[in-house]
Amino acid sequence: MPRDPRYDVLFEPVKIGPVTAKNRFYQVPHCNGQGYRDPSAMIRMRANKAAGGWAVLCTEQVEIHHSSEITPFIELRLWDDRDLPVFERLTAAIHGENALAGIELAYNGMNGPNFYTREPPLGPSHLPIATFTYDPVQARAMDLSDIRDLRRWHRNAAIRAKRAGFDLVYVYAAHGFSTFQHFLSRRTNHRSDEYGGSLENRMRLLREVTEDTRDAVGDRCAVVVRFAVDELMGADGITRTEAEDVIGRMGEIPDLWDLTLGSWENDSRTARFVAEGGEEEFVRGLKRLTSKPVVGVGRFTSPDEMVRQIKSGILDFIGAARPSIADPFLPKKIEEGRIDDIRECIGCNICISGDMTMSPSRCTQNPAMGEEWRRGWHPELIRAKQSDARVLIVGAGPAGLEAARALGQRGYEVALAEATTELGGRVARECKLPGLATWGRVRDYRAGQIAKMPNVEIYYDSRLDAAQVLEFGFDHVLVATGATWRRDGIAHHLLQPLAIAAEAEVLTPDDLMAGKRPKGKSVLLYDDDHYTMGGVLAELLAREGFAVTLVTPAAEVSNWTQNTLEQFHIQARLLELDVKILAGRVLSAIHRGEAETACIYTGRTDRRAADAVVLVTARLPDDRLYLDLRAREAAWRDAGLRSVKCAGDAWAPSTIAAAVYAGRRYAEELDAPEIGDAVPFKRELTALLRD
């Protein structure tokens, strides 16, 4: 299908100093949880994106010196020449797909606790380190000798990057992670010498390092400044006015400006808190201050929005991290006129949770993310079928839909039986909650792909039992029937059922998502799940006029969403909605019209009036069909049935991303040779050096 001419502007080449990008699709630096531990996996992931049409592929932040490292987080390291082979392989892989390779050199300074090297962190001022946790470590204020050392270290790293084959070299001053941002911001720069006080002094180090980098590698490499245009802290931090001044004074020194917001939590907000293109208000007008190209982000998935930002003069490049993870082939699909095939990012930040938990990044939409090298999965391709087997999938939630899509792509004949009249399972329900509409893309993408497959049939309103399944004559059966929320209080904190009075009104997320509401106006919501559900249901009820008290054993609301960078935003929203929050308390009993809670530290109890209690706790797999089929295994042979598997929440309740992954894994492994007890994926093993 030919490309829509409306999108031609996206495929214009753009000059960046001494190099030229073949189009305007720019994968900005992003973490991936692989880094120095899993370099082959990281390289394959970036190379797939290059094959997908991205003109520029950047690394995550790359530590340039052993005096600043961010253990326990796993990024890349360019401490000395011994690190070069990884980067040489990376640039060769990217260049092999006719794309440019960029490296984000990072000196984290007071954002790096140095737990591995045990070096005292360095920063502009004597301050505690600025990490995600309150580590008992302080940064030492840099003297002029330290600043000279840093300039030399950065220059040496830039030269190594050039030797490794990079086309773009970053000077990183963004996300609250970089020493250069720490010097820029009044919040962290308390100096009174030539590097402190006035903006001219605070930006001195950024200017010097940018000029050093141009002098060292600018003959062949483009120099990029990644810059926080607003720290959203008012006069205490970098403001938009100061950002304009910085770009006005330095506008022509780098070859490209990469514009971000001040902190990662604000620069990568979830779809629940910001719409596509949501950073436009912060970057609009900055391009006029420089003749050099500008890249910015906005969780772009719509080609029309991309074109508007380019033609409006807001950006020169469409920057993307999360959308490039959800669909590494997004540019190629636009170029080939396959807009309906784009696997749109849902803005859930599960990808970021990988980095935050020091594990390979995952993606709700793209189950191949992190598995490109380990398992040999490709985001677009899959091996052809190995037999003429027919497969029945029971349940059209995220696991069932992905299994049907991937098996259909392989060429198998698939029947997808759904008990209701709607596809999507939990996704169909959860996407109707406040701020989660984009989660419906998990269903929509797969339903759209399946609709094109004549070998996949969907049967609605088809609740099946084991006897019916055995009558159908399928070779393989996958049970993907989901899970239900528990009504007994069992979750992380309570491992035995709660005492619940028979006359008490107790609801679960399933009840609320089905449209049921408390009879009275006073609601106690008990959240021992700690992901999105508790906070989003509290918001739902508060917006509908209920008086909500959220009780949680954790120290804060939706505690696990620290890993998706949204906990602060969730708690702030609930407070704005007058939701009362009681942290550090566990539900101990539910009576008619009141609930009893206990302090997790002292055990002291109290009673609170509540017309109804909503339990957001653990879930139970709906695995009855699977267990019934396993119990009738003696009848499989006569029925022609060769295997019965269970996947997704029906096997082990988890995230939507885990369910989608389970569906893809089932499809990948069908008819594959048995591997017994072998590890089912490749690992990068450490070479032992002689003492």
Image (cartoon, rainbow, N blue to C red):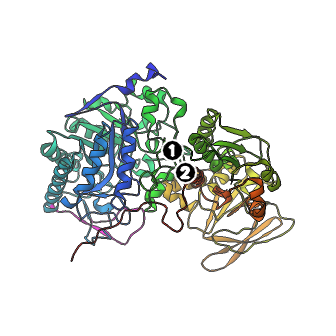
Q: Which residues are magenta?
A: 126-143
- Crowdedness of circle 1 by 10 Å Cα count: few (<14), some, many (20+)? some
Q: Position of residue 375 (x, y in %)?
A: 46, 55
Residue closest to the far front: 638
Q: Give the vertical position of 337 relative to 663 (above or below).
A: above
Question: Looking at this view, is 410 or 99 the one in front?
Answer: 410
Q: Position of residue 538 (x, y in %)?
A: 66, 54
Residue receiving disc 2 = 668
Left or right: 235 in relation to 634: left
Q: Residue at x 13, y 57 (%)?
A: 148
Left or right: 114 in relation to 384: left
Residue closest to the far right: 503
* Quarter residue 154 falls in: bottom left
- Identify the secondary structure beneath mark 2: helix
- Identify the secondary structure beneath mark 1: loop
Q: Give the vertical position of 52 relative to 32 (above or below).
A: above
Q: Which mark is residue 382?
A: 1
Give the total of numbered labels. Answer: 2
Q: Tag 2: residue type?
A: Glu
**Is the C-beta separation of discs 1 and 2 under 8 Å?**
yes
Q: Residue at x 28, y 43 (%)?
A: 101
Q: Which mark is residue 176?
A: none
Q: Position of residue 289 (x, y in %)?
A: 27, 31
Which secondary structure dominates the residues rendered in magenta?
loop
* Quarter residue 612 falls in: bottom right
